Amino acid sequence: METQSMLKGGEFLIRPVEYQDIFIPEEFGEEARMIAESCQDFLEAEIFPNLDRIDQQEDGLMATLLKKAGDLGLLGLSIPEQYGGFEQPFLNVMRANEALGAGYSYSVAIMAHTGIGTLPILYYGNDDQKARYIPKLTSGELMAAYCLTEPGAGSDANSGRTRAVLSDDGKHYILNGQKMWITNGGFADVQTVFAKIDNDRVLSAFIVERDWEGVTMNPEEKKMGIKGSSTRQIFYNDVKVPVENLLGKRGEGFRIALNILHLGRIKLGATVVGGAKRTIMHSVQYANERKQFGKAIAEFGAIKHKLAQQVVLTYATESAIYRASKDIQDNMGRLLAEGRPAGKAAIEGVAEYAVECALLKVFGSEALDYVVDEAVQIYGGMGFSSETPVDRAYRDSRINRIFEGTNEINRLLAVDTLLKKGMKNEFSLFEKAREACETKDQPLAVEGIPYFEEKQAIIKNLKKAILMLIPGISEAYGRKLAEEEEVLMNLSDMLMQLYTLESTMLRVQKIEHMNSQEDILVYRDILDVLTHETAMTVYSSGYAAIASFADEEQQKGLIQALYQLVASKPVNPKEARRRIADKLIEENRYCF
């Protein structure tokens, strides 16, 4: 793919995309399928039979299970061969993350180790640091943790108080401070610790080993969910960190932290898909088995609605995640071809799509929350019992809206990043926004045209609906826009729904060109339901934004235009959902 044709991060709002230009999961090759099967087999053999033992944090069990994954090569999928890994393409790694996402607390531990634990050293470490640590992290001989959060410095990570001072002999940094909510904290041998050197305004990063003098920790935290995940506070009291363990450059820590979080967000989007698919399997199997009023509850319309909506949200998340992942993979390849070092290409390749990473972290985590909540409801009273699998799924899901930056922070980040890209003229955002304002009363026709042309027209109208708000919001608030978080989150919700809808539309369109079987129509049902819901969300969020920033005269014209732009050909969402549910019920498993 040539550089000029590559879609930049956030540019989906102003540029049309053809189905030929995206990747869909149906295109995965044999290697990706084998990796996913290996992950699934590992969960079946080692994790699912031991879920209670894992949740009880049996001493040494989680570390042993991670080491077993290392023996199978599952810790080294992102790692270059020279360090003992398999160096898989980004898409294949994401497919493995999805498969492992069904592993409840275990998925948290392995994702923390292979992602935020290992990758800072791989991407920012020098040759000596990588040679010392990466092979052992790949094999599972060493375990990793990422130590950023502090008491009083959650979302505002750069306000942390952990300090490092160079020793008089210049050989060590003397580290003092406290970190909290550290995943794998109880057993991680290697920690990436963020601290400020002297009176620096920004963070630096250090590689710290657990057994060094002065490293201590509190007992395990008692948590609502992910009970099997080790979570501890860690204290650093005059810890002598060799100067050669400074990771990256002085003052580069905040950039390291942010860039690793971009990666964590898109990967979390994949893991929640795996969790959602497993929960849907439990939902439909119970609905098929449970009898009430003389028939299986799966036959009732209210249950079909829940089952279908679980599918719609999961399918949309999956569609968007792999679309974005392919863009990231292509960008990594482009940067490598331009001569960037591998680590820098990987980091910059992801950072370009910070908008998509943030939006999909939010959409995916909230989709999973819907799926697990309705799973409990489908189980009824039994769903409230810890003897059923949906109890664990429900509790474990909740953390995902806080992990990798809260969903509120990610909503704000997505819009802020998009607007900054526009102000830097990385693409013509404000020019297109002005055009949208000038033509807001001229929506494209969405009736009497072929199916996919209709969906494309709807999406173009929805893009215009978002774009037309940007000039008014910018003018109304100016430099104080950052303080108008409610309005920014309105925009973010519109963007998020738009991106997932477009991704789903392109996927269904591509499937139809690959496969002409009759059951393809159920995917149109998924798309129809999602289109209906997206239009409603764009209208509701757009209305709230307009009412917040526009005066009475402006409101009238903008709301009328918004109403016209979200209009679409009516569909029957009840019957569409019933057809989706009927396929799920017939297969008795997630089959989309």
Image (tube, rainbow, N blue to C red):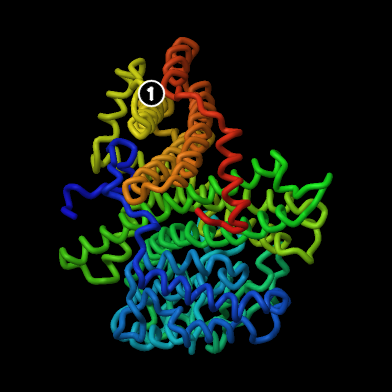
Is any part of residue 394 visible from this angle? yes
Q: Nearer the viewer, residue 208 or 466?
A: 466
Q: Tag 1: residue type?
A: Val
Q: Quadrant of the N terminus?
A: bottom left
The residue under the point 55% across, 64% down is: 149
Q: Residue 386, relative to residue 480: is it above or below? A: below
Query: In the image as oriented, which residue stretches furthest toward the top?
Result: 553
The residue under the point 48% across, 27% down is: 542
406 on left or right of 458:
right
State the residue position of label 1.
Answer: 446
Q: Nearer the viewer, residue 532 or 394?
A: 532
Residue 385, image x, y percentages: 81, 61
Q: Quadrant of residue 479?
A: top left
394 on left or right of 46:
right
Residue 565, image x, y percentages: 41, 22
179 on left or right of 379:
left
Q: Secondary structure at mark 1?
A: loop
Is any part of residue 201 visible from this angle? no
The residue under the point 69% across, 53% down is: 375
